[in-house]
Amino acid sequence: MSGEVYFTDMTANSKRNLLDKAVGVAKKSAIFDMVEKEDKVAIKLHFGEEGNVAFIPPPLVRVIVEAVKSKGGKPFLTDANTLYSGVRHNAVDHLETALKNGFSYATVGAPVIIADGLNGADYVNVEINGKHFDQVKISSAIHYADTIITISHVKGHELFGFGGTLKNLGMGCGCPAGKQAMHSGMIPTVDEEKCTACGVCIKRCPEEAITRKENKKAYIHEERCIGCGECVAFCPVSAIPANWETSEADLQERTAEYAWGVVKEKKGKSGFINFIMNVSPDCDCASWNDVPIVSDLGIMASTDPVAIDQASLDLVNRAPVIENSVLGGKAGAGDDKFRAVHDRNSSHILRHGEFLKMGNRNYVLKKVWMKMGKIVG
């Protein structure tokens, strides 16, 4: 069985602009048909890091919001807090960053809700019985939404190779403790020089695996620790550093399992849109964006998260590179662009997503044609 992926290119004119095409391809994929009256619809996206301007522009998000409202849904824009310290590590700074990058009610027509609350503690344990996790920690606002529509910017990533729908769903919808669990199965340790003996980690530990040493500093008992990442996420002075060490296969498989934890609760109520534009070599979490590695290629929509990512990856790989990008002279049409940038194999997350029966790597690409702003095929 093949997943259906709808595609429109980036050509535009006075009769059909990119706003028309974005909402048109999403309509053709039947994403909006899953929205029922009064549904609370989580529109999951990345608000961009301060200094990075490659994220999806607010006007393109607004037309998706308007289409959801036309079905009687109640949309809200959302993302979860980051594990690393920065301008999106807590809800206050996260909202400030979203506003600076243009995501306000005035520009998009929907409220912005940080999915895991003020400090990343608002999440739900969802049972999945996967290869790596029995349960995953999904941000509450996303879990309790009736419908989810992810809007993903296809780009490179230093750990995943590339980021699209599956990474947006998995890493993006997990709370900070979940993000730590995805990044590493290793037991955390305490940096005693930084530890202030505040006791926050002791209170957050679900297994009572953290006690105080004679000097009052925190100590993690390895034999009791389950590697949940709560102490890493909530230490106010970063005395229990995030551990990023893992194999690329494990990281991607764990992220696929978090993505599964989101969509398994919303069967028939999950839709996905990928914007293959400003395909920067690095993630939108970076405080910069470099020259795109390929030209703007198009917009895809699907109800199959695996198929849409596979189709996006194939489209990028078939395209010629932009000569003054980091790939100029190093790769060409038909080459694995993201592997050439980061030396990462991006297929693990796709393969595991298919194994979890989230979707299919085999797909049928259906081109959507528009005339006079209306869908004609």
Image: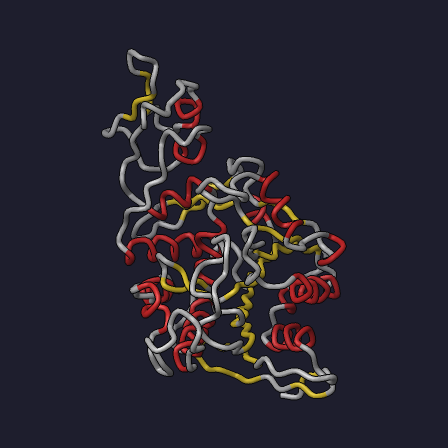
Q: Residue at the spot x=71%, y=52% of the render?
A: 104
Snapshot quadrant of residue 18 = bottom right
Q: Residue furthest front?
A: 324
Residue 84 lies, with reference to residue 1, above or below; the image says above
Q: Residue at the spot x=56%, y=63% of the render?
A: 151
Please state the horizontal and vertical placement of residue 153, each as a whole percent of the image: 52, 64
> Image check: 10 left or right of 328?
right
Please state the horizontal and vertical placement of residue 58, each as a whole percent of the image: 66, 61
Residue 213 lies, with reference to residue 228, above or below; the image says above
Q: Residue at the spot x=33%, y=52% of the render?
A: 130
Q: Residue at the spot x=39%, y=54% of the render?
A: 255
The foreground one among 52 and 32 is: 52
Snapshot quadrant of residue 30 = bottom right
In this figure, which colouring scheme has been used for the structure? secondary structure
Snapshot quadrant of residue 115 = top right
> Image check: 238 left or right of 152?
left
Please state the horizontal and vertical placement of residue 9, each as a whole percent of the image: 57, 81
> Image check: 182 left or right of 43?
left
**Residue 269 visible to the viewer:** no
